[in-house]
Image (cartoon, helix red, strand yellow):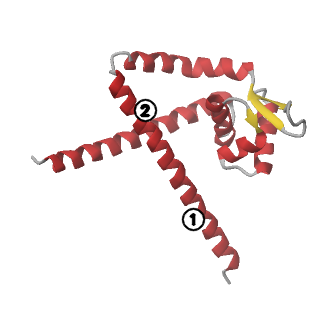
Amino acid sequence: MSNHKISSELRAQVAVAVQRMQAASDTMDEAAASVLRINRTDFRACSVLAYSGPMSASALAEATGLSRGAMTTSLDRLEKAGYVRRTAAEADRRSIIVELTKKTLRIAATIWGPLAVESNGRLEHVSKEDLQTIVHFLEGSTRLLESHAERVRGMAKRRVARKAVAP
């Protein structure tokens, strides 16, 4: 069998494995949102805060793809539930900084702690070079998905615009 044939078969296997992992991740996120009793939009905001740390409300809106108004509504719900805290930024008191609460971090540890332990255990025997390859692949895939999400959002906006001007 030629290297090209093996390579295309392996690329197809990678594509399927990534799709399955994304679906499993989506299932996990849905389950976690259910435990928290929040919708997926609010969950996405918490997720961004979990991996990025505290940030301005406007930066969080941008990171989640929400309008500032929608972000405010989401933060109102999350603050009422005790999952986020908004404080005035030290540098500019007009700017609002959003952060996860200790309550949220405790719940997150209960949800994702066992997964993190098991994942780390699985990676213990993976070589440094293979781990670097995995990180490189995942970071590149993330950038690719983000750019195509932007492209697809643009398609949706154009579709809405066409409907608005249609007779």
Question: How many numbered marks are there?
Answer: 2
Q: Nearer the viewer, residue 160 or 92?
A: 92
- Which residue does the image show at 70% across and 49% down from the upper left? 66
Label 1 is placed on what type of residue? Answer: Met
- Residue 33: image quadrant is top right
Q: Give me the C-alpha separation between circle 1 and circle 2.
A: 30 Å
63 versus 54 height, above or below: below
Residue indicated by mark 1: 155
Label 2 is placed on what type of residue? Answer: Val
Labels 1, 2: front one: 2
- Which residue does the image show at 54% across and 53% down from the upper left? 149
Residue indicated by mark 2: 135
Examine the rendering and report whether any part of residue 68 can be seen: yes
Does 58 sit left or right of 45 as displayed? Answer: right
Q: Tag 2: Cα neighbours inside 10 Å, few (<14), some, or many (≥20)?
A: few
Q: Position of residue 166 (x, y in %)?
A: 66, 80
Counting residues from the N terminus, which is met first, the one under dot 1 or under dot 2?
Answer: 2
Which residue in the rendered view is the most extreme toward the left?
Answer: 1
Does 103 sit left or right of 124 as displayed? Answer: right
- Which residue does the image show at 47% across and 49% down from the upper left? 144
